[in-house]
Image (spheres, rainbow, N blue to C red):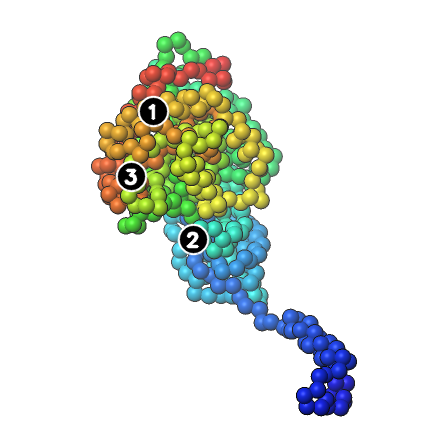
Amino acid sequence: MVERDCPPAPVGALPSAGATRRRLISVAATLLVLPVLPRLAQAATILAVRTWPADEYTRVTLELDSELKAEQFTLENPHRLVVDIEGLTISAALNDLVSKVRPDDPYIQSLRVAQNRPNVVRLVFDLKQPVAPQVFTLKPVADYQYRLVLDLYPKIAQDPLIAILNKQSGPDVDDPLARILEDIQRNPVTRADPPEPPRVRGQQPAPPLPTAPKSPPATASRGKQRMLTIALDPGHGGEDPGAIGSSGLREKDVVLRIARRLKALIDSQPYMRAYLTRDDDYFVPLHVRVQKARRVHADLFISIHADAWVKPSANGSSVFALSQRGATSAQARWMADKENAADLIGGVNLGSHDRQVAKVLLDLSTTAQINDSLKVGNAFLDEIKKINRLHKNSVEQAGFAVLKAPDIPSVLVETAFISNPQEEALLKSTSHQDKLAQAMMTGIQRYFTANPPLARLGDLS
């Protein structure tokens, strides 16, 4: 208004200092107003929905183009899980999630979706059993955008000792795990209240267990062979597919098939039994894989993978052990970094992760464990080279998080390069999967023949 009342300046004349100052003030005022203009809110877009049902837990994932907030609560009579998601409206993708609930899901009976209020969608899960849910968000990583993750755990989780004792030992076999379960049965833990929801899978207290299989007397007799427990760890799973070959073969699928074949060979031995850290297509955090092996008092830990490299010409099998002094090669370091990133891709709820416990667990690795792991690895290489070219003729070492059980010899086997078309074709072959399993079985037998396991603390009473 003031500037409009000023007399016009002569043509060609420079503006006065006062006029210039007034124009600058006017422009600045306009710039200050622009950012506070109201902007219409836009609902987030759902990019994909996925479900991963398994006996251990069921995961439901919503992948979105932006990060959203969610609140959840449970109801009883009947059991339900209610999740309210802010920033969403009903869409075809959400209706697609309803159809992804499988009839054989151990936890979810059905799912209902509704617009609870403007910009808030409500998911109601009708449950088959009480659950201890964990709901959290993940930042973009690898091929994923923002993810809202719903993990449905059983309120009382099954102890892995039950699953591993399905194989009954003979009368001439000492089985310390059976004695542990018998002791638990004789001195059950009574709880006035139901247990709290598990903080991290594998860390919750075990419930009272059923009667264990018949076992030998509490004190093992001299000359009696001890039952050996082998923990098999199929890499990746669920949200984390691992490496993918040119034909679409996924690492998580093929390593599970090989692990199941190796488990069958181990279980057929009179003094051995195998335990799978995952027996289906679901994600297991790295530290939980280690905890599971320790919980079942494993005598050996074998993590099974299928390698990948930027060049498809890379080929051959490899075996890795832990290193406390850095990697033995640049490729070993790269491989460890890639495998250790599995938690970021698969999705770990950091809010419920007891970082101090995990750190203590990973810092306890000992020289003796590494030395035994190198012996196992060399036995494996001697057998695997009979059926496939070796990428390296010696056991490599790096800081693999999954190999850091302080008291269990642990190796990571890269069976072949899934990024190599010829080796991918081999990995697809059931006959080659059998050969790989048999090679590892022979390596296991060679290691324990040369290094008979000693009785552990707590094995004898």
Q: In this view, does 461 lie to the left or right of 321?
A: right
Q: Which of marks 1 and 3 is nearer the N terminus?
A: 3
Q: Is mark 2 on a helix, strand or loop?
A: loop
What residue would you read off at disc 2?
143
Q: In this view, does 46 lie to the left or right of 273?
A: right
Q: Relative to 358, is 366 above or below?
A: above
Q: Dot 3, how many residues are within 10 Å of its Cα: few (below 14), some (14-19), or many (20+)?
A: many
Q: Which amino acid lies under the numbered mark 1 shown in the image of this protein?
A: Asn
Q: How far apart are marks 1 and 3 (CA)?
A: 19 Å
What residue would you read off at disc 1?
378
Q: Residue at x 74, y 85 (%)?
A: 3
Q: Which amino acid lies under the numbered mark 2 shown in the image of this protein?
A: Asp
What residue would you read off at disc 3?
315
Q: Where is residue 55 in the image (x, y as percent from the top left)?
A: 42, 41
Foreground residue among 336 and 160? 336
Q: Dot 1, how many residues are within 10 Å of its Cα: few (below 14), some (14-19), or many (20+)?
A: some
Callout 1 touching callout 2 (CB < 8 Å): no
**Residue 342 - label:** none
Q: Distance between the residues labelled 3 and 2?
A: 25 Å
Q: Where is residue 366 in the image (x, y as percent from the top left)?
A: 49, 23
